Amino acid sequence: MIFAQILISGFSLGSFYALIALGFSLIFGVTHAFNLAHGELILLSGYLAYYLWKFSGASPYWAVPVCLVVMPGAALLLNLLLRGVKAPFELNSLVITFGLALFLQNLMLWGFSADYRLIQPEMGRFLEAPGLRITETQVMLLLLSLAATGLTHWTLHHTFLGKALRAAIQDRRAALLAGINVRRMGLVAFGFGGMLIGVAGPLYAQTMYLYPAGGLEATLTAVVITIFAGVGRTRAILAGGWLLGVAESLATFLLGAGWRELVSAVLLIGLLIFRPHGILAKGEG
Amino acid sequence: MTGNSRLSQALALGATLLLALWPLAWPEADLYFQVFGMACFYGVLAVAWNIYALCGAISLGHAAFFGLGAYGSALLSHYLGWSPLVTIPIGALAGMAYGVGCGLLFRDLRGVYLGLATLASVEIPKVVIDNWSSLTYGSMGIVGLAGLPDIRLGDLVIALGRDLKAQYYLLLLFLLMAGLLHRYCLFSRWGWALRAIRENETAAAMAGVDIFRQRFLAIILSSYLTGLGGALYAHLLGLIEPALVFNLHISALPLVLSIFGGRLQLYGPILGALCLYPLDQLILQPRLPTGHAAVYGLVIMLTIFFFPQGVASWLLKACRRVSN
Amino acid sequence: MNKCRRFLLIVFLLPVILLTLTSVLWAAEPVKLGEINPLSGYLAKHGWEIHQGILYAVEEVNARGGLAGHRVELLSRDDRSSPEVAVNQAQELLYREKVVGLLGGYVDSLVGPISQLAARHRVPYVASASLQSALTRQWRNPYFFRVSKLEGIVEPLCQFISQTLKPQRVAILYMATPGSTEFATEVAGRLRRAGAALPLMEKFRPGARDFSVFLLKVKEAKADVLISGGFFPDNLILVRQMRERPVGLKAFIAPWGVAYPSFIEEMGPASEGLLGLCAWNPGVTMPGTEKESQAFVQGFRHRFGVEPNTTTMHGYTSARALLAALEKVLQKKEPLTGATICRELAGLDLLLPMERLKFDAYGDPMYYQQVVVQIQQRKMVVVYPPARATGRVQYPWDF
């Protein structure tokens, strides 16, 4: 039964990784903007949820709709900033968002102080099975991540807008030729990405802790999973997140917490070498 | 875009002379020796990173070479007691060996995939060194590393370990050598091959460029130079720890400095290092003890906004406009 | 460049030029002290707490009229948790600002290089939160003093565990940093000698966000006591995950990050029964200093709007030590040099809320001993040593 418990840990953690990565993947896929300030945006969303929770006393899940509305606004501001960036775009967007991340980090330090903040979980609610226990947080994590991923996947594959987005991700020039307003797709991507960030924030504040310098970890996770899974592929991102989560949990159990990063790194490198276009990609050029 | 106008060449010469001669006027300016020395050091790291970036490979994991070079030298110095002048070049080979490994393993990766692979590749030596405490002292690190030794030339004693002015000149020399290397990388036949690979790999292959070989050479050079930097760093600081040398900051800073300064320009990475680092340490930090990091971030953002090809490109264009 | 961009560029460059110019001008002199702390980045919380403690001590002195009539000026710098930035800033303070004393510091790998630099400039450095033994035992540095030491944490912890808890099996979790690693090694050695079994001892890298699998191993190992060498944020996650899924522990003890009012506040009811160590807290103070401690807490609350904690007090204590030494030198009408200040520091014997402060020949504090507290009903109750206990430990708990 231990392994079942480990798997559950891995899956819930992995779902969270996937949720963090989704927003980044969409934005990067459509606009090729390498947003290194992604983690800081999630933190901002988290801080918003934290203060809403603190001052209203309501359940933290009520903060999710608010963040869903506010964060796309922030993301669109970022889009505006990146509009002014000239060639080489990918590289420059990387460095500009690096500067932005530094700036936001210290803005949050000034505004929210360096204290660690946590949305306190309500203890004691969980699902129990013989030898197994799934906590409420894990359930919510799984549910919300699956919902977000499912919604994104449905939008991308079953709506016309989604088709246009996917076209822009696959080949911008071809999409332009096909008459798709790639610029507007960029806006949509940022908006959608902002919503995904909005969902990730409150969950982040609950399962981890809020801290101005904490954005880097989240950004790294997002980058890793996006490239690992292949840009813009929602199901692969979920699978990638799960794979990483389970691998980390197994590594921690079998080898010890000190070897966790090594196993992830080896897994990542191995996959990059053998399936360079993402784990579920069909090996296109 | 990478040629030089007369004016810019004169400026470069003037700047070099200034860097070499100002200590004669202020012989006791320890603070400035320290900060500008480190700025030169980061200039070397930026050049080293840029050499690999010249073939189009944006590496996010140069800290691996840095850390391995540092540990190579530190362990040799700690266990065998050799002089740092010997252990530094040899220790850097550890960085280069890892560069060889990465070059072979990542031969088919490009773009963001390569970036990610290099990012992940930092974890492997870091975790191994961190856990192998019997050899490397693990997380405890090694303190009390031998500083750079004294060099005796007849009656003259250059105390590299203790005299900050001597260290400054050493680092300046290091930077000038890196600059010459950079020039070679840009303007030699090999440099053109790298540029061709960066611009359009398929076309370059059709023109007869051996893609794998040129990229491999680039990473060997880049990783050795970075390893040298790491080894030097360990002995300058006198201590070493896995978290210190396998740091994301060490991977990120040369990248930022290169792009800030202009990675396609001869003096780009060097200019980036010499401008941004002292600005941060000497001006932003003391004047804004609590807001300096935010301003630093702002400076980076605004510079890329106004000078998307880097500061050096803009300077070059300005020089050309003045000359005409 | 079009006109708009040119205008923006000038607006941006002007402040930079002005800042550069003002950097070159020299300031006039009251008594100048420098402090270097991590004010941004991963350790910012602790850096700010130390900074506030030091600032409060300096303001306290200035409110009294200064040191023998001289005002004290505090220059703060941010080391960004990087040794070379720490050294650069220390150089800046020593060379450009010409400070007569240095304070602060949180990470030992930064404190070491700063202390060497201070020795070279013959300026005393009183470190606020340094712990590792190598700093004072490996090289004799007559200019280095500190108000804390690892021994002051390890000894009470091990004695408490072996005398009061008497567990059969102990699990240790520690961080991949030099301080936490040295701590874990020392504790493990002592507990083994006292007869306890150590079935699980694991290291994690700072920034790890999930301990659920480790806790599973703790359960499998049937450990009685878990010692956590993690910091504040790590314990936030560790304790919460432990509460969510009980692992059969009888006690949880963490030297860093639990005995903080803000920890109790953030964790809420989940903090019940946890054991921690601290050198001081509001309500936990050296016998004989209750009034002073109360005054400090109230004054600090009024000044900063936050509750002071043990880290704050470390900053405050180090500043008090240096200021006391400076005052003695000035009262004797001697010049403020490294030799005179260090002489007075070596001869200090102050009863402060955190400890009876007296330095030994190596610069270590002779009487630094933390106390073990247990969180009972959202309050910290001292449970060890018996001489300072304010309540009984509730053991075994059920985690």
Image: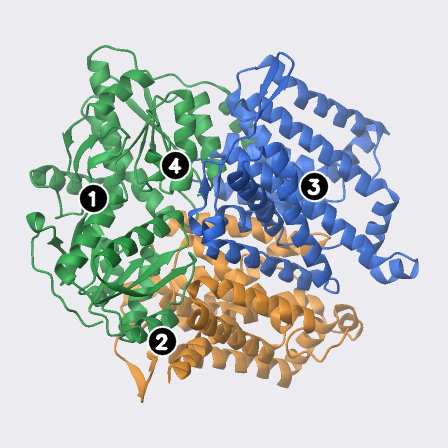
Determine the residue positioned at 17% across, 53% down.
Answer: C159
SS at badge 3: helix
Q: CA distance from mark 4 to mark 1?
A: 29 Å
Which mark is on residue B47?
Answer: 3
Q: Residue flagged by tag 3: what amino acid is it? A: Val
Determine the residue positioned at 33% across, 79% down.
Answer: A135
Q: Residue flagged by tag 2: what amino acid is it? A: Thr
Q: Quick check: marks 4 and 1 in contact, CB under 8 Å? A: no
Chain that bears disc 1: C
- Which chain did the image draw in orange? A
Which mark is on residue C111?
Answer: 4
Residues packed near mark 1 inside 10 Å, few (<14), some (14 to 19) or many (20 plus): few
| Image position, residue C195 (x, y; %) | 21, 61
Q: CA distance from mark 3 to mark 4?
A: 31 Å
| Image position, residue B139 (x, y; %) | 44, 51
Q: CA distance from mark 2 to mark 3?
A: 48 Å
Depicted B293 relative to depicted A168: above or below: above
Relative side of C373 to C128, left or right: left
Q: CA distance from mark 1 to mark 3?
A: 51 Å
Which mark is on residue C301?
Answer: 1
Chain that bears disc 4: C
Depicted C28 relative to depicted B112: above or below: above
Q: Quick check: marks 1 and 3 in contact, CB under 8 Å? A: no
- Which chain did the image draw in green? C
